[in-house]
Image: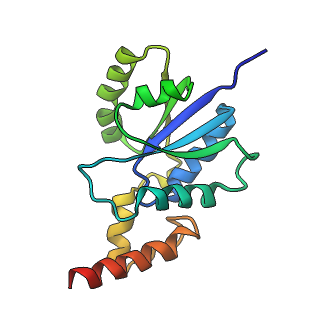
């Protein structure tokens, strides 16, 4: 009996963008199960809590694939150790440009050194999302620019509300 092919798609997802959702959708065509793994990095100050990011992922990805094929989880520490605990055969990484490739290449090599049984699969961003990053989306939203089409419908209002709250808190 064949085993389930599990992939991990790691990131901060602060916030989740339509580019992320596109990569998740495409990964479900390649793997039986995709675990969207939200990195809990104590060195970063995210806009949304880890639990809020998990909730937004689950809401935004509902209906993309059959129930149970897309999960969202939290992790910290080494990605390949987490992937091995989950029984994953692959890690998904999205590439928007050559700069992303240059950034990812050493990590891919290190992960292969640490866990050669876990492949890294790089998916090129769709042209319409190649300019998207969570950081840029937050910056555009913070300065009053339109984020329509950049984030899932359930994420946009939360992002705008959180940025208003953050602005009031800092004032």
Between residue 69 and residue 133, name the one nearer to us.
Answer: 69
On screen, residue 75 versus residue 142, left or right, reads right
Q: In percent of the image, x 41 and y 56: which residue is there? A: 131
Rendered image coloring scheme: rainbow
Give the residue drawn at x 45%, y 51%.
130
Counting from the top left corner in percent of width and height, residue 91 is at 49, 31
In the rendered image, residue 68, in percent from the top left (x then y), is placed at 71, 43
Image quadrant holding the N terminus, namely top right
The part of the image, by quadrant, that contains residue 137 is bottom left
Query: Horizontally, is 30 left or right of 46 in the view?
Result: right
Q: Residue furthest right?
A: 1
The residue located at (62%, 42%) in the rendering is: 26
Residue 70 visible in image: yes
Does the image show residue 120?
no
The relative height of residue 90 versus residue 60 in the rendered view (above or below) is above
Q: Residue at x 56, y 26 (%)?
A: 88
- Indicate the position of residue 25 as horizontal and vertical percent values: 63, 46
- Which of 99/133 is in front? 133
Q: Is residue 66 above or below residue 93?
A: below
């Amino acid at each position: 009996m064949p085993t389930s092919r599990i992939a991990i798609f790691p990131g901060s997802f602060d916030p989740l963008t339509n580019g992320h959702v596109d990569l998740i959708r495409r990964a479900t065509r390649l793997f039986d199960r995709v675990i969207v793994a939200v990195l809990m990095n104590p060195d970063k100050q995210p806009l949304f809590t880890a639990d809020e990011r998990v909730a937004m992922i689950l809401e935004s990805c509902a209906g993309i694939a059959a129930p149970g094929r897309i999960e969202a989880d939290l992790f910290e520490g080494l990605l390949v150790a987490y992937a091995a605990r989950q029984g994953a055969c692959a890690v998904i990484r999205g590439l928007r440009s050559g700069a992303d490739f240059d950034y990812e290449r050493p990590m891919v090599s290190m992960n292969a050194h640490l866990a050669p049984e876990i492949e890294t699969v790089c998916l090129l961003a769709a042209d319409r999302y190649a300019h998207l990053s969570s950081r840029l989306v937050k910056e555009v939203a913070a300065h009053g620019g339109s984020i329509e089409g950049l984030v899932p419908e359930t994420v946009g209002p939360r992002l705008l509300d959180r940025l208003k709250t953050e602005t009031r808190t800092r004032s």
